[in-house]
Amino acid sequence: MICPSCAQRFTLTLARYMGVAFARFACPHCGARLRLRQTWYYWVWLLFFGIIAIVVPAQALVWAGLPGLVVAIVSLGVLGVALDWRLEARTATPVLIGPVSDRE
Ligand SMILES: [Zn+2]
């Protein structure tokens, strides 16, 4: 993705992706505070994954009891974060929300 402040290209690393969730996301070059603007198909994916995240653990509980539920939630959590990270890295646009911070 390209920083709207300094126009330099940077990648959405896992650490930066985690920063987005906690609103601590900054350009590695100029330190500008950024947020991500999502595309419409991001919200479709989120809705789709939300349905899966309800249906699959419920089915796992029926088939395999509590251990099945735990395994389903943990694997869906890891899968969801990984897919979400890759999708945002490819499709989201960084938007400037604040001035250059002294951090980073
Ligand atoms: Zn920048």
Image (cartoon, rainbow, N blue to C red):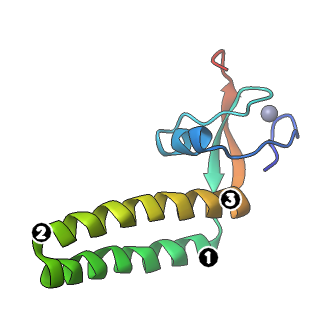
Q: Amino acid at mark 2?
A: Leu
The numbered mark, 1 or 3, whose residue comes first in the sequence reads 1
Q: Position of residue 22 (x, y in %)?
A: 47, 39
Q: What residue is at 66 percent from the left and 21 percent from the top?
A: 101
Q: Position of residue 25 (x, y in %)?
A: 60, 36
Q: Which residue is mark 2?
A: 66
Instruction: Determine whether label 1 and label 3 are within 8 Å by CB.
Output: no
* Cα separation between marks 3 and 2: 37 Å
Q: Which residue is mark 3?
A: 92
Q: Position of residue 34 (x, y in %)?
A: 66, 40
Q: Is residue 100 above or below residue 41?
A: above
Q: Amino acid at mark 3?
A: Ala
Quadrant holding ligand 1? top right
Question: Residue extending furthest right?
Answer: 7
Q: What residue is at 48 percent from the left and 71 percent from the top?
A: 46
Q: Is residue 63 above or below residue 34?
A: below
Q: Amino acid at mark 1?
A: Tyr
Q: Secondary structure at mark 2?
A: helix
Q: Is residue 85 above or below residue 32?
A: below
Q: Secondary structure at mark 3?
A: loop
Beta carbon at label 2 within 8 Å of ligand 1: no
The numbered mark, 1 or 2, whose residue comes first in the sequence reads 1
The numbered mark, 3 or 2, whose residue comes first in the sequence reads 2
* Cα separation between marks 1 and 2: 33 Å
Left or right of 43 on screen, residue 62: left
Q: Quadrant of residue 50?
A: bottom left
